Amino acid sequence: MFAIETKNLKKIFAAPLFSKQKPVCALQGINLQIQRGQIYALLGPNGSGKTTLVKILAGLTPPTEGGVSVCGVSVQNQGELTKKIGLFFPGIKGLFGFMTGRENLRYFAAMQNILGIPAQKRISELGELFGLGSLMERKVDSYSDGMRQRLCLARAMLHDPDVLLLDEPTVYLDPIAVREFHRILKGVLANDLRKTIILTTHQLEEAQTISDVLGFLSQGRMVWEKPADLFRRGEANLLNDYIKTVGLNHLL
Amino acid sequence: MNHAGLEKLKNLVVLFVRIDTEQKTQILSPYLWSLFVCMIYGFIFKAALLGKSVSLGNHHLAFPFFLVTGLFLIRLVIPSMKIFEDPFETLKNHDLLQWILVSPTNLWEFFLAGGLWRFWLALTEAGCILLFAKIFIGTPVLPFLNFYVLVALTLMICAYAGLGMMISASTLAFKKGSFLFLVINQCSIALGGAFFPVFLFPKPLFLLSQCLPMTNALQIMRLSLSGASFSEESAAIGILAAMAFIFLPVGFFCLNWSLAWCRKNGKF
């Protein structure tokens, strides 16, 4: 069984009510098969459908056509899906800055139906796992961006999901924090805990460094899928492939 | 609701309390408004108000009661309309909407928690008006603690909460809700009869004022405070109850529909 499988996935966004705009076809027949424990990087220019695909996988918006399953659970089954999926946003917003890290996690744990002693235990575990330690007692306002990212990752892991969806996870980070973040993603989550990770990114180096498979979306279509090893070994050049696929006109 | 459900609800309510109390000025301003308004009426108009009464048809109500009921309900219009909109705004402002949507927490659980907190705030604001009115204007508090006053209060809050949900739905789906909010809010304040009897209006405005939940709630409260019988209040109670029982489910339906529409079309 694949961790994530989509069959001929299509998504059409209706025009706003009472407007003259036309419906937008965001995804056109996406077929994906992602193995458990894999890190899959979704690449593509702005508006190519990456975030829409992540939103469908998370159950945030339903597909117009086609089948989508996450760990054998259909995305229509929202109740079960929420147990399988952890969603990660870049941590500039979405946390309560006036609370400590621990308090933040406690409220988010309650939203995940994890309450009382099990919640305290899980929060302490995650604090250790992501090296938050004494930071957990500090107000989030005083955190650096890297610390916030780690807290957001801990938040996404509260209910121990099998699949993590990360939308541009390193967008606000400096190179050292990026490196630390990659270590956690690759070393701890994918290798040790066997979590399946899908990330969208514009950072080509990041994509080829930490992912196992790269998928390239353009205008709602999956143009190519290649193992990241190919790029790491130097048998192909990711930037060249990117430019070839999108076209130089788009970049200029 | 089981123990875990209550524990979760408690956590969500406390979360709203903490978010709101972080912005202290926002929390304090309604209470300060109550204080200043009662002080102004007390210090400047008290002598002029004493001994005056307002005609309610077959009954007369002492002017301080007339004034305080108006202030009391006028404070409740906006909080009632925003009972469900405010929690939703909180979610959006903190960039938490998507996170909630992929968690087992239903959006309505969040609305319920936020609504309970806002309802409590609205009631304490109204309580403050009564307290300050007692201190500065000399209006006794006890007559307000009667069954019909509570009925009027509850039905009015339900009716405005329903209208508020319809407005939120319109904001979500058509991006045109603030205008409706402004119209209903301003009409309620201007035509609801908070500061003068509505029978003084010209006929068209009088008829319009009868369509507002606030007018009917005020009528029930004032008649009840002036010692009128149930039969004299029953028409206003009937109209207000009909508004509450129509607006609330319609508002719920509209908001649910627009949330589903936004979700389907990726508008969150």
Image (cartoon, helix red, strand yellow):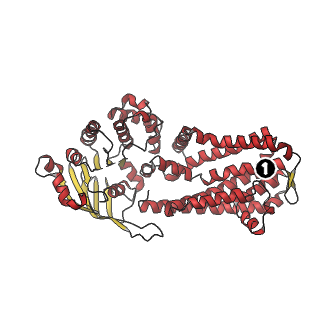
What element does badge 1 sit on? helix
Assign the N terminus of chain A to one quadrant of the image: bottom left
What type is the residue that disc 1 sits on? Leu
Q: In x, y percent, where is residue A176?
A: 27, 36
Does B170 sit above or below residue A43?
A: below
Label tally = 1
Assign the C terminus of chain A to one quadrant of the image: bottom left
Quadrant housing residue A186: top left
Does A103 sit above or below residue A27?
A: above
Does A19 sit above or below residue B77?
A: below
Q: Could one spot residue B25 in this view of the protein?
A: yes
Toward the left, the furthest residue is A235
Q: Nearer the viewer, residue B71 or A126?
A: B71
Q: In x, y percent, where is residue B230?
A: 82, 57
Q: Could one spot residue A120 in this view of the protein?
A: no
Q: Nearer the viewer, residue B245 or B181?
A: B181
Chain designation of label 1:
B
Q: In x, y percent, where is residue B88?
A: 52, 51
Which residue has dot 1 on it?
B67
Toward the top, the furthest residue is A134
Residue at coordinates 56% horizontally, 53% vertically from top-left? Answer: B85
